[in-house]
Image: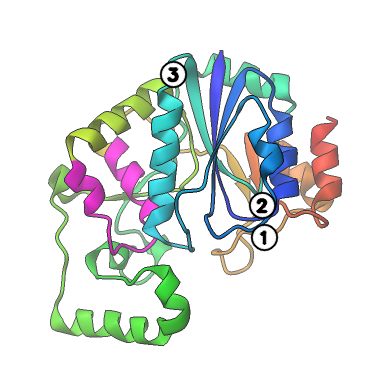
Amino acid sequence: MRQAILITAYRDIPLLTHLINYFDGDFEVFVHLDKKCKEQTNHLHEMSNVHLHKKYKIAWGDVNHLKAIILLMHEAYNHTDLEYFHTITGSDYPCLPLQNLKSFCEEHRHDNYIEHFPLPTPMWGSEGGLQRIQYYWLQPSARVKYGRWIEKSIKWQRRLGIHRSFKHFDGRLYGGSTYWSVSREAVGAALDYLDAHPDYLRRFRWTSIAEEICLPTLWAGIGMPMHNDYKRYIDWGPDGANPQVLTEKDYNCIIASGALFARKMQSGVSDLLIEKLSHQ
């Protein structure tokens, strides 16, 4: 069975290269590299199974991250021999030996591993995550410079009773992780819906962290069968919001997790962990 790896990355090209080299000819690797990245990537173009894009400038929470993922989904789906699809970051690394990863995905080729939960949820703040999509958010590139004024803008929108409607799927919203492992059927169904309803994707303009709402809502809305497990190992740290850089000390927890991929790695910090994962 041939599979697609969809990677969004923005730096640490040596780590990205190491990640890509994990996969053999049974995989096609589709990479979107942040347009702002200045690191040398010529060698990636020479890899036979790598498809490199550099279309969007991406900041944290920017809708362009969602657009980059959908771009990779479209290109990968056009390869009709690909049967299973994974989204990961350039800071991820597989938790399993390659053959074990292949065997798992072969056995579960029609299963969809997608974190999903109804909104609002207490996990996402005082408004349960609805603030991300009900108000108008300036894009993150502006937030760095005007963050204080954006906070004031959201407060004023609350006071003025601004409430952007969501008309799709009877207004039902779902949240979940950006990263998933799914069947060809799931990717095809998502792309068919997006192509038939261009207003759906447009609705996520001026939304904060749109990638954590758009696809979980879509798949739940069309009734796609899903396991509520994204098969990723992440240490969210003491605040529960920021992925911690993993080291060799995390190895046993990663192996025991049953995850397919671990996040996040960093060159010079996670090298021993990556070596241990590579030589299981």
Q: Residues within 10 Å of mark 1 (few under 14, many from 20)?
A: some
Q: Is residue 212 above or below residue 79?
A: below
User: Can you give x and y, in whole percent of width and height, for residue 18 in the image?
Assistant: 75, 39
User: Could you tell me the amino acid type at mark 2?
Assistant: Lys
Q: Is residue 280 above or below residue 123?
A: above
Q: Does residue 125 show up?
A: yes
Question: Looking at the image, which residue is at 56% across and 16% down?
Answer: 2
User: Can you give x and y, in whole percent of width and height, for residue 64 in the image?
Assistant: 40, 55
| Disc nearest the viewer among 2 and 3 | 2
Secondary structure type for disc 1 = loop
Distance between the alpha carbons at the discs numbered 2 and 3: 27 Å
The span shown in magenta is: 198-219
Q: Which callout, 2 or 3, points at the residue further toward the start of the chain?
A: 3
184 in magenta: no
Q: What residue is shown with label 1?
A: 244
Q: Is residue 27 above or below residue 263?
A: above
Position of the N terminus, as image quadrant, is top right
Secondary structure type for disc 3 = loop
Distance between the alpha carbons at the discs numbered 3 and 1: 32 Å
Secondary structure type for disc 2 = loop
Q: Which callout, 1 or 2, points at the residue further toward the start of the chain?
A: 1
In the displayed structure, does residue 267 sit left or right of residue 39?
right
User: Could you tell me the amino acid type at mark 1?
Assistant: Gln
Position of the C terminus, as image quadrant, is top right
Question: Looking at the image, which residue is at 47% across and 18% down?
Answer: 83
Q: Residues within 10 Å of mark 3 (few under 14, many from 20)?
A: some
User: Can you give x and y, in whole percent of width and height, for residue 47 in the image?
Assistant: 68, 29
Q: What residue is shown with label 3?
A: 110
Are dots 1 and 2 in contact, CB under 8 Å? yes
Considering depth in this image, is 75 or 162 the residue closer to the camera?
A: 75
Q: What residue is shown with label 2?
A: 264
